[in-house]
Structure formats: structure tokens, C-alpha cells
Image (cartoon, rainbow, N blue to C red):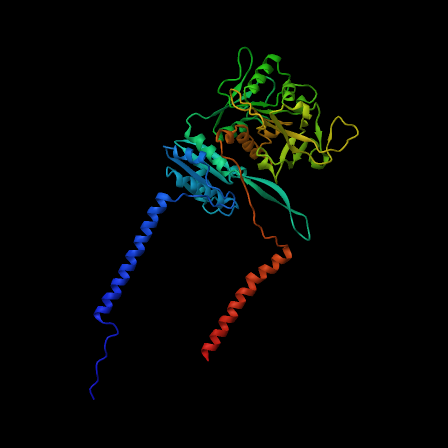
Amino acid sequence: MATTPEKPSFSRSKKWSIGFNVVLAVIIVFALAIMANYLSGRYFHRFFTSTQTRIELSPRTVSLLRSITNSVAVTLYYDKEDPLFGDVSGLLKEYHAVNRKLTVTTVDYYRDPGGAMALMAKYHLTSSTNKNFVIFDCEGRTKIVDGSVLAQYTLEQVPNDTEREFRRKPVAFNGEMMFSAAVLAVINPAPLKAYALEGHGEHSINDTSETGYSTFGSVLKENYIQVEPLSLLGSNSVPEDCNLLIAGGPAVPIPDFELEKIDQYLAQGGRLLALFDARSAKRDVGLEKILAKWGVNIAPDLVVDPEHMASGKDLVVSAFSLHPAVNAAVGSGLYMILPRPVSKGASNQVPENISVQEIAFTGANAYLNSDSTHHPARLSVMAAVENNGTKAVVGERGMTRMLVAGDSFFLDNGQIGLLANRDFLNSALNWLLERDTVLAGVGPRKVTEYRLVIPKVQMQKLQWILLGAIPGGVLFLGGLVWLRRRK
């Protein structure tokens, strides 16, 4: 019996029709992708969607980035597991999107030790700086932004049934402000200038001994700030190019004619880092009366805090106000040596246009050394002074900004590496130099946090469910399916 040959499932014309449809669909998809690319490039405006900022780059930053004509290399020397890494990386991608001359690379020092060593050698970093940094480099001019100052923190208690626990809660993100200031620093051939007062027993920036300030000077250079010693003897005055005047612990009285020059500098809108110490506790050095005019009182006394002392002469300061200058020390502390009390004057002593804020404090049971009754009190050892914005008085040099601390030894070569002393100096310099003011419209961004609070007991149960119950359930169901198929 003859069999009829089977007809092919698809005729030649049907195959050609299907092939044509597939090719046409591919062409249409490519055309749509090209059109979407063109429209987005021409009309779509990028915006920053970080959980920390939720705001697009400020017009001031965009204008600054578009003005860059030289190549700027940005390196994230960062632990990718750090909570801020995603926000820092995302923000820098926005910078790169505005101007392709700003390139961004990442070196994870935990996972890429070879790259980390090469970077440390290139930028002369030491093992003590093996932590999160963002390095900006333009034609050999570098600016290193410490990751610890990119966010402002406050301490909050973590709900816990068994023990008291605290964590550093981010409340503001300074990324755009700090990065734009760094870009401005490296594209400008002329660095900022600081002068260290000398001739009255101050710590010398050229002194490499334990009580010297040579490391202090190195930190200034890391922040792209040139520093020179300054004597106000004779006809010398505070130079016109002085961006910051440093009084690093004068131990003997400063002559009146020198004080007049410092007073004039501040009246012109100068910036001052004034550091006192125990050597001047029983005799004024002269800066006290100048600072009193700005609403800051430095008492002729010493602070004693037995609960926060180790040797009887040191003091660990771990209570701070929410202020950019001390933000890096939150959760750690400052290691000081018998500081003098620094406090805000009475309301009638503070000029109308000036804001004075106490920013670093002892514990609640501290007392003044001269107080025989040891009356307990929380004492301030540091204050910040700036224009409060109600009456913008701008001098020849800008708007006056000062940071006054009751100790100078905590920043010398022997102490600067302890606790957060070095980090404090970095953040204090950034605040004093008013880089946020230079970059008008660029400031800290509020942080909105969304957290699921789970007690430890519930967390353990959740871990058992995720690591045991769910995988076990999948294996059980898989076994049932296997058994059923066997039947």
C-alpha cells in the first residue's frame, strides 16, 4: 500500500514570512533603543536618587563642574561594605555625568590590597590613614576628603531588651559640599594659606618633637593648605593672603601692639583657630580679652573630670553638640590634657550678628580645679563663632569664623593620633575655611532614614527562618516532586 508523503509543517513562504517578522522586530527594537537614547541625551535631566540626599546637584555645583577644562581624577579609597559607600559613589557618578573630564575609580583597600598599596605610595599615605578617603587629583594638585566627615551624626539608643546600646545615626550628608570644595581646590593653582603665630611659646609647625606641631602642618598640606610661621613683631601684620590664623597655645602674654593686629584681622572677616592650654591658666595671654568681645569666655582655670580621666591629667571628651567642626569625633572622642573651660558669654556680651555655640563638653560631674567644693557640672571646653545670618557683616576677608579650644596639646605630635583628634582637625579646618560659604547654595542634605527595628531575640528567629526554614522547605517540596515523578 503506497504511503502519502507528509507535508512539511512550514511551507517555504511561511518560513520566509517568520524570518522577515523576526528581522523586522529586531530592527524596530534597535530603532526604539536608539530613539530613546537620543531623546534622553537631549531632553532628560539627571537627578540624584541617593537615600542620603534625594536631591539633584545644586546649580552652583553644576556650574562649577561645567567650568572644568582640565582632567580631574577622583579615587574612592573606600570599603565597599561601608554604609556610606553607595551614596558617595552615586554622588560622584552624578559629577561624572555633568563633566566627563572628571573620572572616578574605586580602590577597595580590603579586597584589593595591591591597588591600595600602589595608591598609598602615589599619595604618600601611611598605614594610619588606611580608612575611607576620596582623593581628588588635578595635574598633581591633590585634595583628600576624609570619609568620616561626609555625614553628620548624632547618638541614639538602639531598642534592646537586655542591654543599653547606642549607634551613630546620620542626620545630614555633606558629600556635595565637601566634594565641590575639593574640586574647587584642585582646579585652582593657588592653594589656601594658613599662618601659625609664633614668638609666645606656641607649638611650632616645624618642630618634630612630641610637643611639636609638624604633624599638624602635614594635615594642613593634606587639605591643600600652605602653612607658614608668622611673627607680628615690628611692622609685620597679618598678611593679605591669610585664609586662617592659628594661635597654637601661646604660653606667655602677647604684646598689645600684636593683639591690635590680630583684632584688626578678625574685624576684617578673618578666620582664627585659637588653642589655649594649662600653661596659661594662671595668666592671660591677651587673646582672652579679644575673644570676650566676640562672646567667648576663657576662664583662668582648669577642668577636672575624674570619671573621664585615666592618668589624672588627661580628659576624654565624648559629648558634643551637632556641629560640623566636631562631627568626626561623635562616637569616639577627643583626648585632651587638662583643658581650660571655654564657654559662651552672657547674651549681652555676644554681638548681635554673631553666633557663639559651645560644641564639646565634659561629663556631668566635672568641676573647676580652683573649686575646693568640687561642685559637679557639665563644662564646655570648646566653642565655635560665626556670623548667624541675621545681619550679614562681610569684612575685607569675608565673614569672621573662629574655633576656640581649651587645650593645644591634643593636636601635638604625641597626641594627634589618639582617638578622633586628627579627624577633628580635618573637619575643623574645612569648617573654618568656609568652603560651604564659597560654594553658595551647596550645603548639607537632610538624611531621611527608614529602619526596621528588630530586637535581638526576633533577629535570631528571623535568621533561623531565612537560613533553615526556607531552604529546608524548598528541599522538602523538591523531594516530594521527585518522589511523585518516580511513581
Q: Residue at x 42, y 28 (%)?
A: 188
- Furthest-top residue in view? 234
**Residue 318 position (above or below residue 481):** above
Residue 157 or residue 163, whichever sits in front: 157
- Furthest-left residue in view? 2
**Residue 481 position (above or below residue 429):** below
Percent of width and height locating residue 298: 67, 24
Percent of width and height locating residue 70: 37, 32
Residue 412 or residue 381, whichever sits in front: 381
Q: Residue at x 55, y 16 (%)?
A: 231
Percent of width and height locating residue 390: 58, 27
Q: Which quadrant would the N terminus be assigned to in this image?
A: bottom left
**Residue 282 position (above or below residue 318):** above
Left or right, residue 113 beside residue 297: left
Left or right, residue 473 beside residue 93: right
Q: Can residue 300 be seen by looking at this rendering?
A: yes
Percent of width and height locating residue 230: 53, 18
Residue 56 or residue 462, whichever sits in front: 56
- Furthest-bottom residue in view? 1
- Furthest-right residue in view? 373
Residue 295 or residue 43, whichever sits in front: 43
Marks counted in the figure total: 0
**On the image, which quarter does residue 309 sit in?**
top right
Q: Can residue 78 be seen by looking at this rendering?
A: no
Q: Residue at x 50, y 40 (%)?
A: 132
